[in-house]
Amino acid sequence: MSNAGETALWVWLSLVFGTANERMWQLSDSYDNVLDFCKAAARGAVEGMTANERQAAHTVKLSEARALIAKWAEKGVQTVGFGDEFYPKRLKWIPDPPPVLYVRGDISVLGSQTAIAIVGTRTPCEYSVSAMNMICSQLVEAGALVISGFEQGLDCEANKTALAAGGKTAAVCGRGILCKAPIDKLDEGIVGSGVLVSEFTDSNDYRAPTFGSRNRILCALADGVIFIECSDVSRGLDNAEKARALGRPIFALPPADITDRKFYGQRDLLRAGAVPIFGAYDVIRALKNSGKAEDMILPDIFENKKQTKNVSAKKKTKNTKKIKEKQAEDLHKSENSATIDMSGLSPRQQEICKALEKGELHMNLLAERLSLPVSVLINELMTLQIKKIIDELPGKRYRLKR
């Protein structure tokens, strides 16, 4: 089947089951491929389908899906199905990936560099805007892709700052793909220097149910999530729940005023373990310490180190430190490999153990690194726990048994 043909099947499924419907993935779990699942659904032979879903599967034709793809192509919108080559890999390992993404711009920027999501209120104070401008500019200079939820306030200001700094940027829209940005022509700027994506095609008004579904995509695409300003009742805190579930690190800008309720969201996040940040350096350092952001750099302006006249001595110290770190890492690996008997493990279980040799990992991050569906990984992790090879930690994190 051609790629376009398979994309039409994914569009057909979204028309039958609706967008952001986790049940669709649960129902399709026992089928080998999307074509077999679609055929069974069209016959009403999928166990667990509701009456409305069976009716939709009977009445919606595949030709309608093809017509929609052509319609959006005429408007400059690319339709990317779950099985397409350009579908973001990071989305494939979440429990409810969007079956279809509607895209304006270059979707290849998603996954090509470290991505940082910016989250915050639609009515930010001057302090928050100033801090966000500094942090986003520094992130762009260090090589990051800035992502937002494409709403008024800090979301769009983050995209605007990234573009002004000469970087690429992306936005995940909770409305239709052709919706206009709150800032005039910002969507055109994003499309020209990045990408705008949505799982919705229409241009209907913002609806609350789309908020959480957008956030799951935003957090899945990001390596880390920064909270700039939010109250303790902010809907944006939903991003923290999504980030934790996916094993993404959470960062928070310290409040400008600890007595002002509009900063209570950050206060609570910091109390819960979010990393406080005073610039992009803190974000990049935390990511590098966890084995991420290998493509990013830490310019001297972030490190705020004093200049010394003896440059060669400084380089020698750095080289010595690197050698010691490498020796410690090799020792850590050898200790782990010496205490683990992999002779009775399957090749897949051995891959899991090797991935955990450098330290503990969240289940979703482990699935992403090994390109395994979460449902398959869970079974393997349970087996390794029974064999007393690994330990499960709070928050769906795993490590080799000590």
Image (tube, grey):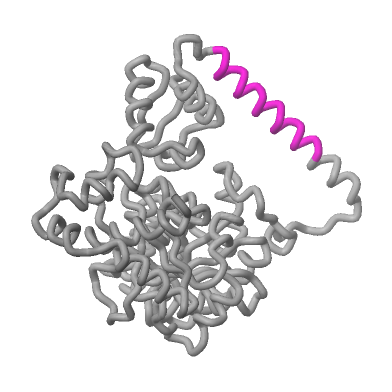
Q: Which residue extends farthest bottom?
A: 184
Residue at the (38%, 82%) spot, across then down = 123
Residue at the (64%, 48%) spot, across then down = 294
Q: What x and y, as percent, mark residue 273?
A: 40, 50
Is-magenta flag for residue 1? no
As displayed, is residue 130 above or below residue 271? below
Q: Is residue 235 left or right of residue 190?
A: left
Residues 363 and 110: in front is 110
What segment is highlighted magenta in the picture? Answer: 319-338
Residue at the (50%, 80%) spot, across then down = 187
Q: What x and y, as percent, mark residue 32?
A: 34, 38
The image quadrant where one finds the C terminus is top left
Residues 172 and 118: in front is 172
Q: Is residue 347 left or right of residue 273?
A: right
Q: What x and y, as percent, mark residue 182?
A: 42, 85
Q: Is residue 83 left or right of residue 45?
A: right
Which corner quadrant of the image does residue 301 belong to?
bottom right
From where the camera sits, is residue 276 visible? yes
